[in-house]
Amino acid sequence: MPFPSRRGLLALTAAVSSLFAARAANAVDKAPITKQALIGTWKLVDATSRDPDGKPLPKPYGPKGMGIVTLNADGRMMAVLCDGRTSLPDGTTRDYASYCGNYTFDGATLITKVDSSSAARIAIGSDQVRKVRFEGKRLVLTPPPVMLNGVMQHRDIFWERISPIGA
């Protein structure tokens, strides 16, 4: 078998390097998220909702949603979210929810045992379950689908860290 040319060796080396780089990037993307990565104070930057077919629905907390979530190292959290518009269209009620409690995190799912809440739909003693992922530096919390106004809604709530310190 003839020895490959220099050009052939360079092409082979580039291909192998690309393969290893792709595997390394994929491994990082699939690395488990640590509790330490969640600790801090985060501000709401976006919230999306879609139906089961993926069709966009109106944004949770309106077009100018506001919110803060804080998770501390002791396993305590609080969240406050609301519609941040200064005025609402007639007949519209302002979305608002706040709750707090002790949380656990297994690397993929954040579970808060609610011990205080402003919203009737977030019962004291209930578990608030959120799937966790990162998109770049944004923390994305995904609650289980919920039936609202006769439509099953799938939501994603996007947060940006404003402090590495949890209150």
Image (cartoon, rainbow, N blue to C red):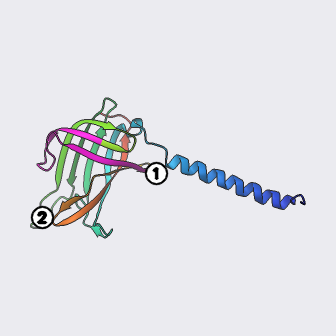
The earlier-in-sequence mark between 1 and 2 is 2
Q: Position of residue 47 (x, y in %)?
A: 30, 57
Residue found 21% across the figure and 55% down from its top: 84
Decide whether residue 114 is among the magenta residues.
Answer: yes
Residue 68 visible in the snapshot:
yes
Q: Secondary structure at mark 2?
A: loop
The answer to whether residue 161 is left or right of residue 153 is right
Q: Position of residue 100 (x, y in %)?
A: 21, 39
The answer to whether residue 109 is left or right of residue 9 is left
Q: Are marks 1 and 2 in contact (CB under 8 Å)?
A: no
- The residue wearing badge 1 is 136
Pointer 2: residues within 10 angstroms few (<14), some, or many (20+)? few
Pointer 1: residues within 10 angstroms few (<14), some, or many (20+)? few
Residue found 12% across the figure and 64% down from its top: 92
Decide whether residue 141 is among the magenta residues.
Answer: no
On residue 92, the disc is 2
Residue found 22% across the figure and 46% down from its top: 80
Residue type indicated by callout 1: Gly
Q: Position of residue 58 (x, y in %)?
A: 24, 66
Q: Position of residue 77 (x, y in %)?
A: 26, 37
Per the model, the C-alpha gap separating discs 1 and 2 is: 34 Å
165 shown above or below 138: above
Question: Over which residues does the magenta segment extend?
Answer: 111-135
Quarter where residue 72 is shown? top left
